[in-house]
Amino acid sequence: MRTLELKKKRRVKRKLRIRGRISGTADRPRLSVYKSNRYLYVQVIDDVAGNTIASVTTAHGELAGLKNTVVDAEKVGMALGEKLKAHNITRVVFDRNGNLYHGVIKAIADGTRKAGIQL
């Protein structure tokens, strides 16, 4: 099996294993992170109601133009934290979506914590 195929297969297995254990509620919604080669997508989801409470992306909107780097990922986390404060949410469950907790994923979590949200 090729290296990239194996890497993707492992990530999908981690994702399914994590999603089996993690679920967001209205009191403590799920913070889901998706990372593409070019953009970052972060959203907060209430799995019970099936609603997206808040979302931030570097593809468009106020954070358009930011790159997929650790420094910019922290800004994304802080922007999401501000949106969550507006919705009176202080605690979330972190769903790294099968990605390793390192680099950009860790920077998003750190930025969210700096904004005052408990993971």
Image: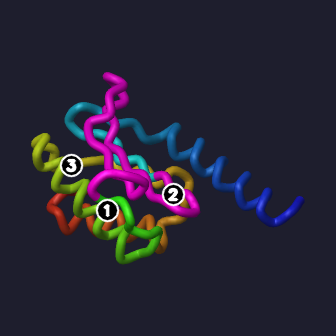
Q: Which mark is residue 91?
A: 3
Kindly give the residue lying farthest to the bottom in the view shown: 71
- The secondary element bearing badge 1 is classed as helix
Q: Is residue 84 left or right of residue 103?
A: left
Disc 3 from disc 1: Cα separation:
17 Å
Q: CA distance from mark 2 to mark 3?
A: 22 Å
Q: Is residue 61 above or below residue 64?
A: above
**Nearer to us in this view, 73 or 90:** 73
Where is residue 64 shown, x and y percent of the image? 36, 59
Label 1 neighbourhood size at 10 Å, few (<14), some (14-19), many (20+)? many
Residue 14 location (% of width, % of height)? 60, 51
119 shown above or below 25: below
Residue drawn 48% across the image and 59% down it: 39
Q: Are marks 3 and 1 in contact (CB under 8 Å)?
A: no
For this orientation, the residue located farthest to the top is 49
Kindly give the residue lying farthest to the right in the view shown: 1
Q: SS at mark 2?
A: strand
Q: Is residue 23 left or right of residue 81?
A: right
Q: Residue at x 25, y 40 (%)?
A: 28
Q: Mark 1 sits on what residue?
A: 76
